[in-house]
Amino acid sequence: MTDASMDNAAEGARRTISLYADDDLTRKRNAAEKRFQAYGIAAIAAGLFFLIVLLVSIVGSGVGAFQQTFITVPVYLDEAKLDKNGNRDVEDIKKVSTFGYNPLIEQAVFDKVTENGIATPLAKRGDMKALLSASAAAQVRDTVIANPDLIGQTVEFRILASSRVDGYLKGRVKREDVERDKNIDAEHLDLVDAFVASGVIQKQFNVDFILGADASESRPEQAGIGVAMLGSFFMMIVVLLLSLPIGVAASIYLEEFAPQNRWTDMIEVNISNLAAVPSIVFGILGLAVFIQFAHLPQSAPLVGGLVLTLMTLPTIIISTRASLKAVPPSIRDAALGVGASKMQAVFHHVLPLAMPGILTGTIIGLAQALGETAPLLLIGMVGYIATNYPGGIAEGFLSPNSAMPAQIYEWAKRADPAYYERAWGGIIILLVFLLTMNIIAIILRRRFERRW
């Protein structure tokens, strides 16, 4: 074969390979890419599925906490029992305890049975006690003390029903369950059905769950998360006022002014390690330093805020340094080139451009602190029952209180199923707060974002 024929054969072989036809290697790579995309779509679908299941479980289990069962009855405020002297003196009226009001309320409910012609084997006034909340007498008593002129009149009250009645109407208490329940029986449930048909018992929106205070284990139907929300609010004020300026100042110094040596390297490593420390360790530190050494009041939002500040600082420092580092060096060089000092270049040019990332990191850190329970457990905010609103700003920081995650934890460990329902309802409120904070972070990022 001549050289010319060999060249022609090689040229013919090259012509058989086309750029428009996939060879085996290209087909394998394309197939692998498609599989990877399918894995990614499957992972996203699985994540969305579990997220939907979680949200449905939370809403389905907690929405009942936003409704409560009430009994509407006219109560005759007997002067002979509530004001024997007849002088309407508040101090004398206060001497009548809730035990003096219970018979009046039970009689009012029993009169409703007779008025509506309901046939029931419950033939005594005292049998109505199982339908009423333990807080009913205190509710009527507080109304009478606030307005003594009501004594001697028949006043209509909307009284909380017991947790068993509320659970029965919400499907939480079954008829087969009451056979082993000492607090209520099937005859009471028959009476509840009759009262529901006549409009005496109704389920209504429970604003007291959002604005009210916690209650003892015997009154789950009265418990609310409002005081705990206020405790979380005061804690977040402490965290914001301390962590933002300290975290941003430390980040600016480390990123812009600190010399690069082994000391700054050690500080950076420790900050990164502190961000990964379990939150309960910060609770132990707060217990030792702020309560046992500094003798600050236990269960106070101030102490909780200080502990959460220690936990949040590494997150804010890391996010702030990342935001400062993302600003192009040309911005600094241009500022220095026109005669600005190092501080002027940082505060007039670099910091404003990094502000969206700083605000986002700060709000995310606050949201993380808002949902923490373990540090609060160590400083006593879990065991405290938040039954009263603070009397002022100073009391809001220094008086014992609880917080939303601590309150949810406390409800979840109580025996009555009504508290378990309220724990889910508290999770819904906490998620609303966290979602709001993340939306604010997005809005602030869009608002302050600048292009370069």
Image (cartoon, rainbow, N blue to C red):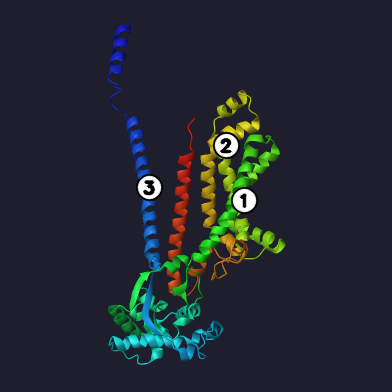
Name the N-terminal-most of marks 3 and 1. Answer: 3
Name the quadrant containing residue 399.
Answer: bottom right
Q: CA distance from mark 1 to mark 2?
A: 19 Å
Q: Which residue is mark 3?
A: 44
Name the N-terminal-most of marks 3 and 2. Answer: 3
**Depth check, front residue: 207 or 78:** 78
Q: Residues within 10 Å of mark 1 (few under 14, many from 20)?
A: some
**Depth check, front residue: 162 or 176:** 162
Q: Do tag 3 and tag 2 residues touch (Cβ < 8 Å)?
A: no
Name the N-terminal-most of marks 1 and 2. Answer: 1
Q: How many marks?
A: 3
Q: Which residue is mark 1?
A: 242
Element at label 2: helix
Q: Which residue is farthest front?
A: 87
Q: Residue at position x 44%, y 82% from top?
A: 150
Q: Amino acid at mark 2?
A: Leu
Q: CA distance from mark 3 to mark 1?
A: 38 Å
Horizontal and vertical percent position of residue 158: 39, 77
Element at label 3: helix
Q: Is 295 on the left-hand or right-hand side of 135?
A: right
